[in-house]
Amino acid sequence: MKVTLLQFQEAYNTEYDEKESILQVKRFLSHNKRKGMLFFQEKVTILNASTPFELYYYLTPNRKTVKDAFPIPTKDFVFYQDRKTQFEIMRHFFESYYLEEINDIHYFEQYNYNKPFVGTHYLWFFKQEQSIF
């Protein structure tokens, strides 16, 4: 789901009846990303408060979520040298997360399958942002 730090701050403060600053929100996001509970590609430390970014939650995607990332529990993850087997495992977790079937395992070539983001509890496969250069 695409959000800004300001939107996240407002939602967080409303949900928890708090008055957290943008710096505290960045710490919260960073802490939960390290655990793998949240995922985003941007460096939150330098992210502008009004810049939109895609935010993913480990339990379930938002219905507005772009399907550019998905989690796998670290306890269930095994890296296979054989790409076909690796893509089959990725497909299983992708389909469990998004509740959508993928018939072509080559779909996962779009994802950074060699270097997922590894959190404490979940790792995330994500599509690399395309460079314009």
Image (cartoon, rainbow, N blue to C red):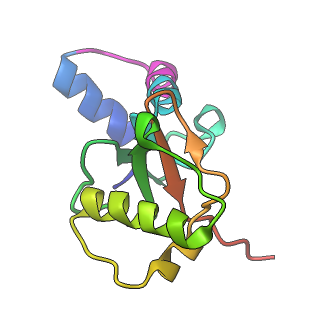
* Residue 65 in magenta stretch: no
Residue 42 vertical position relative to residue 85 in the rendered view, above or below: above
Residue at 48%, 44% (x, y): give it: 77
Residue found at the far right of this picture: 133
Q: How many marks?
A: 0
Q: Residue 123 location, x and y as percent?
A: 49, 42
Q: Is residue 95 left or right of residue 41?
A: left
Q: Nearer the viewer, residue 58 or 48?
A: 58
| Residue at image coords 52%, 33% | 119
Q: Residue furthest bottom?
A: 104
Q: Quadrant of residue 2?
A: bottom left
Residue range of the region highlighted in magenta in the rendering = 18-28
Residue at image x 52%, y 21%? 23
Would residue 51 be visible to someone looking at this image? Answer: no
- Main secondary-structure element of the magenta-colored stretch: helix
Front-most of 48 and 28? 28
In this rendering, the answer to whether 130 lies above or below 7 is below
| x then y, percent, for residue 98 | 26, 62
Quarter of the picture holding the C terminus:
bottom right
Q: Residue at x 35, y 57 (%)?
A: 93
In the rendered image, residue 17, in percent from the top left (x then y), is placed at 18, 16
Q: Position of residue 6 (x, y in %)?
A: 40, 38
The image quadrant that residue 8 belongs to is top left
Inspect this view and state whether residue 127 appears.
Answer: yes
Q: Nearer the viewer, residue 75 or 32?
A: 75
Could you tell me which quadrant the N terminus lies in?
Answer: bottom left
Image-based side of 57 in relation to 62, left or right:
right
